[in-house]
Image (cartoon, helix red, strand yellow):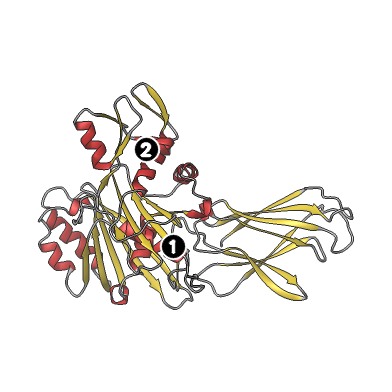
Amino acid sequence: MGTDPEKKESLLIAGVDIGKDSTFLSFVTSEMDEPMTVSTVMGSESFQIPTALAKKKGIGQWFIGNDALSQERLSMAIGCDRFYEKALDDEKVYVEGEEFLARDLLSVYFRKLLSMPVSGITKVELSLLVICVEELDMRVFSTMNAVAQRLNLSRNKLYLIDKSESFYYYTLSQERSIFLHDVLLLDYDGATLKHCFLNKDVRTKPVTVTLEKGSDGELLDMKDERLYDIAESLLKGRIVSGIYLTGDGFDGDWLKKSLSLMLQGRRLFLGKNLYSKGACFAGMVRLSLKEWPYVYIGDNELKLNISLKVIDSNEMKFVTLLSAGENWYDEKGECECILDGNPSLELYIRKPDVRRDEVVYLPLLGFPERENRTSRIRIEAIPVSDSEVKMIVTDLGFGEISPQTKKTWEHIIKAK
């Protein structure tokens, strides 16, 4: 029997929401519209997996999650204290007198986590691992890239986002009526309540999305009344069509007065797996499995587009080096071209919320004198922050006609 040439290979995306205490894992395939979250108890919605790792006494057998805690309680295994935080700081962990790199242990945790069975999903090779963390920084970027290497995942199969970005992807993947107006997220871990508003600017194409974040402190005693006052203040003067509540702090039967307020004319949802599902939706967008007419301008997203004007086969074209909305930690643009005319670059800079380009000319002072079109250069665009990009130009010469000097020129481009 022959194979169907129209049949496409199934893609598998894993979304992991990891923190120092607990982890959530969701999966989605290219055939699914909605991600599925892994439950630790078959047939239930017990989605919370402790961020715990333990080694069986005397042998190299490892347990994760509830199994790790159970084996440790039974004195059958030794727990790896704070291995996730230590991995972020690239520290070592000692178990039964043996030294381990914390990042190696985090890799063991991820390997076992991703091998957990999921009802209704046939596991194929992982197409993309999307990891969601509280906040993205260079420690997280370095740690998770090291973990991906240990898992034999190529760099293009790892995508890092923070919780705000996950909320963005999750919300805009739901029914349109939910995000018709502003959407409010309340995240309560039992200690601190945080809020986040999702706003859209439908006048731009693609639609520009921004998030307003804030902290509302502790609820302490009379939590329901305190939450009522906070919600009333947050909702005042706003048109909000959807509200999401997430976090351990909302456990229990204490939401009464505050809930009735938030439900007035709005859709409200309560659950803990929002971020792992949002990570899956982010992966679907990244792999072009979803139409996405939005661009998110957040703390970690690049605030400018950079293009280069070139002539290709006598036709003028624009080559995009960097795109706004992409995570600046993980972006780099590069191309090679031949200089025509004066040794300089003509770059086109545009912010997502501005319709016109800003033209920037970068002179290559001291460039070797050569005949026209006998100099090949490499152009690299490397973000150094969300609004600054380092441009590096390297002289590559032109074969035997013009030997390369490998001399470089550097300029910093800033979003104004």
Discs 1/2, front: 1
Which class describes the residues within 10 Å of circle 2: few (<14), some (14-19), or many (20+)?
some
The residue that appears at 17% across and 72% down in the rendered structure is 264
Amino acid type of disc 1? Leu
Snapshot quadrant of residue 167: bottom left
Quarter of image, res 208? bottom left
Quadrant where the C terminus is found in the figure: bottom right
- Quadrant for residue 213, please give it: bottom left
Image-based side of 400 in relation to 54, left or right = right
Q: Which residue is tagged 1? A: 11
Q: Which mark is residue 277?
A: none
Asked whether, in this view, residue 253 is left or right of residue 100, the answer is left
Question: Up-down: is 341 above or below 189?
Answer: below
Q: Position of residue 9 (x, y in %)?
A: 47, 65
Residue toward you, 218 or 105: 105
Farthest-out residue, front: 1
The answer to whether residue 144 is above or below residue 412 is above
User: Which amino acid type is marked by label 2?
Assistant: Glu
Which one is nearer the viewer's eye here, 21 or 57?
57
Up-down: is 260 above or below 69? below
